[in-house]
C-alpha cells in the first residue's frame, strides 16, 4: 500500500471510530478518551517520563496498556492518548510480537506518522477545521497571529496552538514556521484577559486558603 493510501485509510478509521463512540468535537476531552480506553479494555498508566516521550503502547500476554507522560499539558496529553489508540486499533499484533515499539520510535516511520494523522483527524476532523477557518474569515496568505487565537477560541476543539499551526501550514494558509516566534499564550491573554488562575485576587485567595 502506498503511504498516501495508508493515511487515507487512517482518516477513514478515525471517522468510523468517532461515529462508533458518538464523538462531538466540542465534547472530546480526557474524560471522553478515558471512557474509550475503558471500553477497549486498555489500561492507562501515567508516568514521569522524559519530555521527548509522550506515550507508549504495550501489549503483554494480550493485555494492552498505554504509558502516558503525566507532565504533558492537557491538549498534548489528549493527543498522545488518541495517538496510542491508533496503535491499539492497527498495530497491536506487530507490537505484541515486538516488531514495532512506539515510545522508542523513529518519528518518520509510516506507523508513527499514521498515528499522528489518526489522532489529528479523530480530535478535529479536517472538514470541521476548514469550516471553522471559513467562519473566522481566514484566507490563505492573510492570516494573522490574532486570527489564530480567535480561531482557537471559536472552534471549541481541544487542540493546541501547535496543532492549529500545523493544520494551517498543511492547507497552505500560513507559511511553514510563519508564527514560530509568536507567544500565543501571551497574545491570548492580551486579547481575552488573564485566565482566573493567573489573576492576582485568585492567587491571593489561594495563598490564604493554602498557606
Ligand atoms: Zn506511536
Image (cartoon, rainbow, N blue to C red):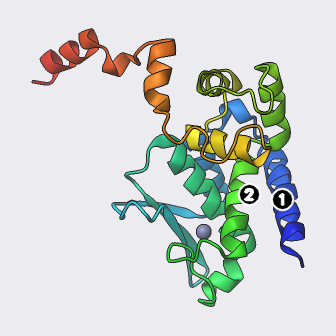
Q: Please provide percent x and percent y for residue 5.
A: 90, 68
Q: Earlier in the sequence, mark 2 or mark 1?
A: 1
Quadrant occupied by the N terminus? bottom right
Q: Quadrant of residue 128?
A: top right
Please tell me whether mark 2 sits on a helix, a strand or a loop.
Answer: helix
Q: 104 or 28: nearer the eye?
A: 104
Does residue 90 appear left or right of residue 79 in this picture?
right
Between the C-alphas of marks 2 and 1, the distance is 8 Å
Vertical position of residue 7 compared to residue 120: above or below: below
Q: Is mark 1 within 8 Å of ligand 1?
A: no
Q: Please provide percent x and percent y for residue 69.
A: 42, 58
What label sits on residue 13 in the rendered view? 1
Does residue 187 appear left or right of residue 96 in this picture?
left
Outermost residue on the top side: it is: 201
Dot 1: few (<14), some (14–19), or many (≥20) neighbours within 10 Å? some
Outermost residue on the left side: it is: 211
Find out whether the residues at labels 2 and 1 contact each other: C-beta distance under 8 Å: yes
Q: Quadrant of residue 45?
A: bottom left
Whether residue 180 appears in this view of the structure is yes
Quadrant occupied by the C terminus? top left
Vertical position of residue 210 compared to residue 17: above or below: above
User: For ligand 1, which image quadrant applies?
Assistant: bottom right
Q: Give the residue displayed 63% in from the left and 89% down from the top.
A: 99
Whether residue 160 appears in this view of the structure is no
Mark closer to the observer (2, 1): 2
> What number of labels is visible?
2
Q: Give the residue displayed 70% in from the left and 26% down from the top.
A: 155
Q: Give the residue displayed 65% in from the left and 22% down from the top.
A: 147
Q: 52 or 54: nearer the eye?
A: 52
Q: Please provide percent x and percent y for residue 65.
A: 53, 69
What label sits on residue 118 in the rendered view? 2
Q: Please provide percent x and percent y for residue 28.
A: 65, 38
Amino acid at each position: 500500500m502506498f503511504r498516501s493510501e495508508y493515511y487515507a485509510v487512517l482518516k477513514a478509521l478515525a471517522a468510523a471510530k468517532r461515529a462508533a463512540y458518538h464523538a462531538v468535537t466540542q465534547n472530546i476531552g480526557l474524560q471522553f478518551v478515558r471512557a474509550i480506553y475503558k471500553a477497549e479494555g486498555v489500561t492507562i498508566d501515567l508516568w514521569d517520563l522524559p519530555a521527548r516521550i509522550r506515550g507508549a503502547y504495550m501489549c503483554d500476554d494480550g493485555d494492552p496498556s498505554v504509558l502516558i507522560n503525566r507532565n504533558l499539558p492537557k491538549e498534548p496529553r489528549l493527543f498522545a492518548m488518541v495517538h496510542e489508540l491508533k496503535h491499539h486499533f492497527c498495530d497491536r499484533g506487530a507490537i505484541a510480537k515486538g516488531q514495532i515499539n512506539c515510545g522508542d520510535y523513529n518519528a518518520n516511520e509510516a506507523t508513527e506518522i499514521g498515528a499522528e494523522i489518526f489522532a489529528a483527524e479523530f480530535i478535529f476532523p479536517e472538514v470541521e477545521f476548514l469550516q471553522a477557518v471559513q467562519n473566522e474569515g481566514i484566507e490563505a496568505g492573510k492570516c494573522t497571529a490574532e486570527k489564530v487565537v480567535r480561531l482557537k477560541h471559536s472552534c471549541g476543539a481541544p487542540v493546541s496552538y501547535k496543532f492549529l499551526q500545523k493544520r494551517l501550514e498543511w492547507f497552505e494558509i500560513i507559511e511553514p514556521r510563519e508564527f514560530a516566534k509568536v507567544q500565543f499564550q501571551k497574545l491570548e491573554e492580551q486579547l481575552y484577559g488573564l485566565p482566573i488562575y493567573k489573576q492576582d485576587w485568585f492567587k491571593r485567595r489561594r495563598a490564604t486558603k493554602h498557606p
